[in-house]
Amino acid sequence: MRYILQLIYSVLIWILITLVTLGVSTSIIVVSFTFQWIDPDRRASQRIANTWGKIITFLNPTWSIKIQGRGYIQEGKSYVLAANHASFSDIIFLYCLGKQFKWVAKDSLFKIPFFGWAMSALKYVRLIRGNQESIRNSFDQCFYWLNRNMSLLIFPEGTRSVTGKLGSFKNGAFRLAIKTRKPVVPIALTGTSEVIKKGSAQFSPNIRCKIKVLKPIQTTAYREDQYGELRDLVRARMIEAIEEGEK
């Protein structure tokens, strides 16, 4: 019986996500192309995108989310936002920050009808894993956006964690931060691994999630060959914040 109830619950959540995605994505696409000349950075469209996560969370009374440190991401400044990635739901909850940013996302997400079309309209950065030309192109796009005072949101693990624990970090985000002299803002999510596990399509109810935005780490003192030190510092702070959030 418990399995049947969870299955019904999951179907209802997928229907909710689908309907909200259709409505929000359509609005993003229309606004993006209607105002493309006066809003080339798609800032108005990003405000609409932020409502996606907020609407889904609001309409699901069994999920609660607590956000701390939102003020560390200041308007008018750009950052490399580095978040841990334990679940598909991380994407939903990170929009609840209500901030301007571009995702660095895998190529397959851009192929999803409506959702992927909206990502393209928002000019998010597309990355084909293992493709060196794509990696170089995505780095150039990231460099471009940071210099236009637009933050980038990156999962430095590169993929969702299978165990829910923080995985090893790739170097790209930290090389980029040092090269552009932009601060890195670690973002620690806890509780999201229980919402929907990797490889599963079933959602869990009664979830309490936390997002803790940590103090920006300045990169101006780092040499370009010190990205490993920056990477390890960011990871250590995220581990500490995750462990604290799980208590």
Image (tube, rainbow, N blue to C red):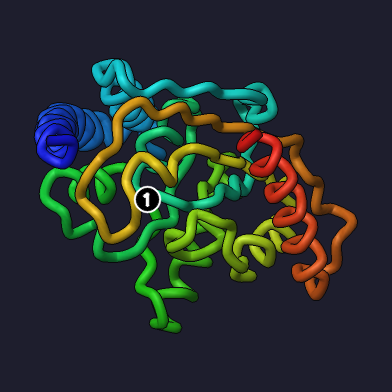
Residue sitting at 68 percent across and 57 percent down? 177
Q: Where is residue 103 in the image (x, y as percent from the top left)?
A: 43, 49
Q: How many marks?
A: 1
Image: 78 above or below 113:
above
Image: 139 above or below 189:
below
Q: Position of residue 73 (x, y in %)?
A: 64, 30
Residue sitting at 10 percent across and 34 percent down? 8
Secondary structure at numbered mark 1 = loop
Residue at which label 1 appears: 124
Mark yes or no: residue 30 visible: no
Q: Quadrant of residue 25?
A: top left
Q: Badge 1: how crowded within 10 Å, few (<14), some, or many (20+)?
A: many
Q: In which quarter of the image is residue 241?
A: top right
Residue sitting at 38 percent across and 57 percent down? 105
Depth check, front residue: 145 or 5? 5
Q: Where is residue 215 in the image (x, y as percent from the top left)?
A: 76, 35
Q: Quadrant of residue 16?
A: top left
